[in-house]
Image: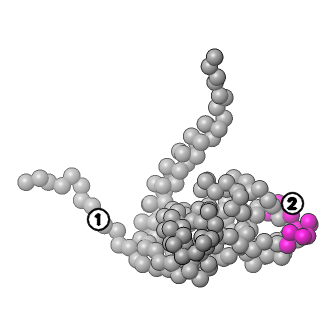
Amino acid sequence: MIKPIAKFSFMELKKIHISDIGKVVTGKTPRTSIVENYGGDIPFLTPSDDLSYKSVPKTGKTLTEQGLNEVKNCLLPPHSVCVSCIGSDLGKVVMTSEPTITNQQFNSIIPNRQFDADFVYYLMTLAGKELNYLSKTSTAVPIINKSSFSNYEVEVPDLDTQEKIASILSSLDSKIELNRRINDNLIPTYYA
């Protein structure tokens, strides 16, 4: 008789809607005709920013306090999870590291206390791929509106399990990020 090497316990998953994870916020763009809205210290995330990082290191555009006042209900706190919901970048996910505004192409989740923000990030990277696929089958321009996004079903474990999963994946992401920075700083060697 073969004895099992390890005893695995399967985690219990609960089916919920994205809106159950926390507050869902759709971004908004301050009027571009008012120059004074732009060029301040408040990050303004758009799909033209590099969405290949877990956290965007720096946004291409920033807002002033005046620009923020036009869209103040859209200000995201740190550790919000932003999902691109239109166009070719649909399904790409980033997390805020400081108070940030996004344009209307993002639906963002401000996780409540029952959810680990890092876990939500990783969950949404998976859900984002499914949303991208679903959107391409329904319209010429891929788009997921706030209602469809909020009502999308996902399966989640309890908070303790979320934290364990997020810890492992975050550790791997940190190592990948370190390697990326090292590679970016390497001096190319050319051979004759």
Residue at image coords 65%, 28%: 188
- In the rendered image, residue 115, in percent from the top left (x then y), is placed at 52, 71
- In the rendered image, residue 66, in percent from the top left (x then y), is placed at 88, 71
How many angstroms separate mark 1 from mark 2 (CA)? 52 Å
Describe residue 137's horizontal placement relative to residue 6 as left or right.
right
Instruction: Indicate which label's residue lies in the foreground, 1 or 2.
Output: 2
Residue 13 in magenta stretch: no
Residue 21 visible somewhere in the drawing? no
Describe residue 105's horizontal placement relative to residue 176 as left or right.
right
- In the rendered image, residue 124, in percent from the top left (x then y), is placed at 53, 66
Residue at far front of view:
140
Label 2 crowd bin: few (<14), some (14–19), many (20+), radius 10 Å:
some
Residue at image coords 83%, 64%: 63
Magenta range is 31-42
Q: Residue 158 carries which label?
A: none
Q: Is residue 135 above or below residue 46?
A: below
Residue at image coords 62%, 62%: 89
Given contact means CB atoms under 8 Å apart, are the residues at marks 1 and 2 in contact?
A: no
> How is the rendered protein coloured?
one colour
Identity of the amino acid at label 2?
A: Gly
Mark 2 sits on what residue? 39
Mark 1 sits on what residue? 9
Quadrant location, the N terminus: bottom left
Identity of the amino acid at label 1?
A: Ser
Residue at image coords 67%, 54%: 50
Label 1 crowd bin: few (<14), some (14–19), many (20+), radius 10 Å:
few
Quadrant position of residue 70: bottom right
Quadrant location, the C terminus: top right
Describe residue 62's horizontal placement relative to residue 14 as left or right.
right
Disc tally is 2
| Element type at mark 1 | loop
Residue 175 visible somewhere in the drawing? yes
